Image (cartoon, rainbow, N blue to C red):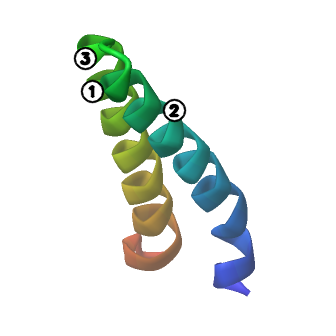
Amino acid sequence: MKWLLLAAPLAVAHYTYSYGRWAIKNGYRRGGAGALILAVLTLALSVYALYLKQEF
């Protein structure tokens, strides 16, 4: 069930990562780096919230 909940953030991270690679390739280094950082943080926060956080 947790894998299903991870599908939406994974799709968002993939789209953002693809845009970041495109931006860096076309000379937009700061924007591309920001997009890549956003993609990594989105995926990391989702994995933390689903798997590592203790439940109450």
Of mark 2 and mark 1, the one earlier in the sequence is 2
Gap between marks 3 and 2, in whole Å?
Answer: 12 Å
Query: On the image, numbered disc 3 is attached to which residue?
Result: 29
**Against 15, is 9 above or below?**
below
**Against 42, is 29 above or below?**
above
Q: Is residue 56 visible?
A: no
Residue type indicated by callout 3: Arg
Residue at far front of view: 26
Gap between marks 2 and 1, in whole Å?
Answer: 10 Å
Q: Quadrant of residue 37?
A: top left
Gap between marks 3 and 1, in whole Å?
Answer: 6 Å
Which residue does the image show at 39% across and 37% down from the upper left? 21
Cβ atoms at labels 3 and 2 below 8 Å apart:
no
Density class for disc 2 (Cα within 10 Å; few <14, some 14-19, many ≥20) is some
As helix, strand or loop, the secondary structure at mark 2 comes to: helix
Residue type indicated by callout 1: Ala
Q: Position of residue 8 (x, y in %)?
A: 71, 57
